[in-house]
Amino acid sequence: MLDYDLDKMLYTLPADQHGINEIQNVLSAHPEVKFVSVVGIDVGGNDTDEKIPVEEFLKDTEHFLACGVQTDGSSVVLPRIANLNNAKVDIIPDTTVNWFVDHNFNYPDPETGLPVGTLRIPSTLVHSDDERVGSRVILRDAIYNFKNDLMELLQNNPYVFEYLDVNSADDIEEICVTAATELEFWVKTPDDDADREQLSTAQMLKEQYWKRTTGPVRTALEEVLLVLQKYGFEVEMGHKEVGGVKAKLGNSGNYDHVMEQLEIDWKYSSPVQAADNENHIKYVVRDIFRTYGLEVTFLAKPIDVVAGSGEHTHMGVAAKLKDGRMINLFSPSDREHQFLSPVGFGALMGLLKNYDVINPFVSSTTDSINRLKPGFEAPVCIVTSLGHDAGKPSRNRTVLVGLVREVDNPMATRFELRSPNPRSNTYLVLAASYMAMLDGIKESLEQGKTPEDLERSISKAYGEPDFYLDTNRVYRSEKDVFDEYTQEERDRYFGEVPRTVWENLQAFDKYPEKLNIFKRDDVMTEAALESYREAVLQQWATELQNRTVPETMDLLRECRRVHTDEESVDYDRHYWGKCLRLRNELGKNSLEETCILTRIIEALKNKDYEQASALQIEMQEKFEELVELYTIDRKNLF
């Protein structure tokens, strides 16, 4: 239990309280805040952290806010930008967003009795004094570009106001862009291994979904929600997700064998603030659960036989009018008969058409690719659902982009991108998504398309040409895309799903015309895109060589014969023979042939990434077959 007076602690310095005197007064009133840290986000999504004593910060706050701190390219992931011979990187505080205090709950301040705190200031990375780089900068520029260009499009295409709850662009004071994420994660007691069969059974029976939490998981979750409220995140709910098994009460009176999946949701913000919020919330979640002896993982697919962790990302666009009203630019004025306005349809079509090049920002790790497979409530196809008619909003959970709307509440209309996961770089996911939406809005409005025109476009058949969408694709389905299409049909209609990080990155080369939407007004420069590609490629290769291959080899060693010669029957010999053959193919070299794991290492050393990718796919397929056969073999016991 957190043994602190939560009401006395400092949590947030809001964006409108960053005057020099205000900052100094607040920090002086909270001596438990001992350090300041500037938080830059590189292209890999990593955030910086350092401990600058508050006394140093207060000596010359104005200079610190203007100049920040200096580091070098070896401290951040900016390949092809911050090189060894040009590595100067400055981290400059951002005064336009909220700042958060990071509390060390294991270290009480002797003077106040409150946890020692670090004021973490979201910041901009600046390379060589003038080039602003990194994920936060890209998102900031993307939203600035989106708002300005959308306003210009509305002014130049006034026909669109026939379908909106506003008369003209002259009535609009400001375009407002909003975003929110939903955080799923697994918690477990340390050193406990997953019982795959029990987890799979519990998932199929839905024994854990939205059930009451118990023991330390309940206490930790409730404390997390209370602390997040203190930060002002406006938490909407926390609950159990589909994965997990019931914890056991041990002889000591403590719960052990905890393995549960949870979700926390909170209110939307501007895109940059939403990404900053999520970044800090992960730290709060991890720190509080650890005080209860529970490990938290934000991996997309920590356990291979049950649902992974998603991070559904919601995106909306509104307009603040000069009379003080807010209107949703995605929502049509006739909500009984139209699903979306031309702006909304254009944005949705832009997301879908360009998703091939958005996906490398969404799924940049092996576990994120592994999550996106049929059968685990994760989207695998580039498709949307609108609903069977405009009066009945869709709740199809099998699509990539969900249209969230309420007929009686126009402000609720937004898009839910269902593919991101907790390890996705939310800054770049949002930046790429909004630039893609802008592309679709631009084409739709400049062509003068009505909601009826655009509904026909997004509902087009395979092979039917369109003014914007690709001919040989289907973009809308009101069916369950897992159960009502074959794998062959899914690949044909919606496009083949990348099976490795390498295959996902190939979209940058395969669809150069789609990649150009990110380069609009230098939101993502060629250097930034190449830096991101290099960062993801090296992360994938390093993880494959130094983590995936050794872990697979360890699992192969654990796969041992369970039947002695005396008790074996033909059934046992049959299945163990198959297991032994797969073990050898995967992990044992012979004089004539090297095994798959060895060939993966050799391919990576030779930088033959295409071969390494193909071998990774073969490794996964054979290992899954081995697990299935070994399970059959070891169950044939009295």
Image (spheres, grey):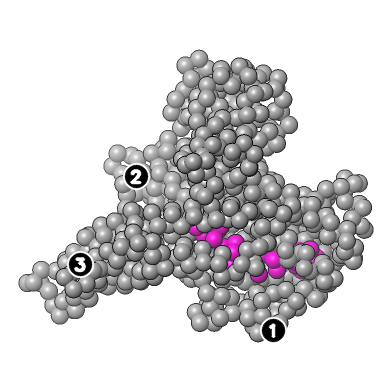
Q: Is residue 337 above or below residue 265?
A: below
Q: How many marks?
A: 3
Q: Quadrant of residue 162?
A: bottom right
Q: Nearer the viewer, residue 435 or 1?
A: 435
Tell me the quarter of the picture where residue 347 sits. bottom right
Instruction: For the residues labelled 2 and 3, say whether their Cβ atoms are less than 8 Å apart.
Output: no
354 relative to 84 in the view: left or right:
right
Picture disc at residue 589: 3
How far apart are labels 2 and 1 at the CA level?
Answer: 54 Å
**Residue sticking out furthest to the bottom:** 463
| Element on which disc 2 rests | loop
**Alpha carbon distance from label 2 to label 3:** 34 Å
Label 1 and label 3: CA atoms lie apart by 51 Å
Residue displayed at 37% across by 58% down: 544
Could you classify mark 1 by the number of other residues whose Cα lies within 10 Å: few (under 14), some (14-19), or many (20 or more)?
A: few
Q: Is residue 346 magenta?
A: yes
Q: Tell me where residue 216 appears, x and y as whole percent.
A: 43, 41
In magenta, the rendered stretch is 339-364
Residue at the farthest front position: 85
Label 3 is placed on what type of residue?
Answer: Asn
- Please tell me which residue lies in front, 383 or 285: 383
Mark 2 = which residue? 190
Number of the front mark, 1 or 3: 3
- Which residue occupies the extreme left position in the image? 566
Type of amino acid under label 2: Pro
Q: Is residue 355 above or below residue 25?
A: below
Q: Residue at x 43, y 57 (%)?
A: 540
Q: Left or right of 177: which side holds 202?
A: left
Disc on res. 464: 1
Secondary structure of the residue carrying tag 1 is loop
